[in-house]
């Protein structure tokens, strides 16, 4: 197919050492390995929801092997219906790297829209 699917990665993460994340100055992860597949982050938002807990929303891209659009979405849904990662690393522009433990993770490829990035599905 050669196309790229855009999706939304939603995480609830916990900072183990009580470190505060600088939520305004973050760097996207160029490569995330999830379920043996490569995702690339295109944008990231982090919001503190409790003392050591953060909600992470990230725009991700995935390049499927499928030949048609329907097959591509089916492939993505099958590959990412469960998430096998337990750690997520957040880096800020000062190169501070924070290791977090994932409490909850979902990826949605089917209804992604982001007008700022000019992506509509």
Image: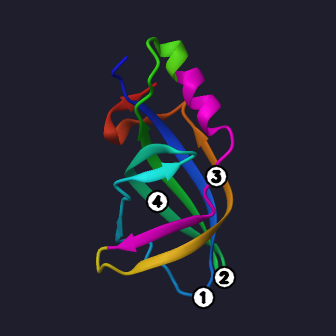
The reply to whether discs 1 and 2 touch (Cβ–Cβ < 8 Å) is yes
Q: Position of residue 16 (x, y in %)?
A: 63, 82
Of the image marks 1 and 2, the number of the one nearer the N terminus: 1
Q: Position of residue 78 (x, y in %)?
A: 64, 30
Q: Which residue is mark 4?
A: 45
Name the front one of labels 1 and 4: 1
Q: Which residue is mark 1?
A: 18
Closer-to-camera residue (66/29): 66
Distance CA(mark 1)–CA(mark 2) = 8 Å
Report the disc number at residue 80. Answer: none
Q: Where are the magenta residues, as a range?
A: 73-92
Name the front one of labels 2 and 3: 3
Of the image marks 4 and 2, the number of the one nearer the N terminus: 4
* Outermost residue, left side: 94
Q: What element does badge 4 sit on?
A: strand
Of the image marks 3 and 1, the number of the one nearer the N terminus: 1
Name the front one of labels 3 and 1: 3
Q: Which residue is mark 3?
A: 84
Could you tell me if residue 110 is visible in this image? no
Distance CA(mark 1)–CA(mark 4) = 19 Å
Of the image marks 2 and 3, the number of the one nearer the N terminus: 2
Report the disc number at residue 51. Answer: 2
Q: Position of residue 67 (x, y in %)?
A: 43, 13
């Amino acid at each position: 197919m050669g196309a790229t699917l855009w999706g939304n990665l939603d995480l609830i993460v916990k900072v183990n050492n009580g470190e505060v994340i600088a939520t305004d100055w973050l760097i996207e992860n160029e490569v995330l390995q999830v379920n043996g597949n490569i995702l690339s982050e295109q944008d990231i938002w982090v919001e503190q929801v409790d003392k050591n807990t953060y909600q992470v929303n990230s725009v991700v891209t995935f390049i499927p092997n499928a030949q048609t659009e329907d097959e591509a979405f089916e492939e993505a849904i099958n590959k990412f219906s469960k998430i096998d990662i337990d750690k997520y690393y957040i880096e800020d522009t000062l190169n501070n790297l924070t290791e977090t433990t994932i409490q909850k993770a979902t990826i949605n490829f089917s209804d992604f829209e982001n007008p700022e990035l000019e992506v509509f599905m």
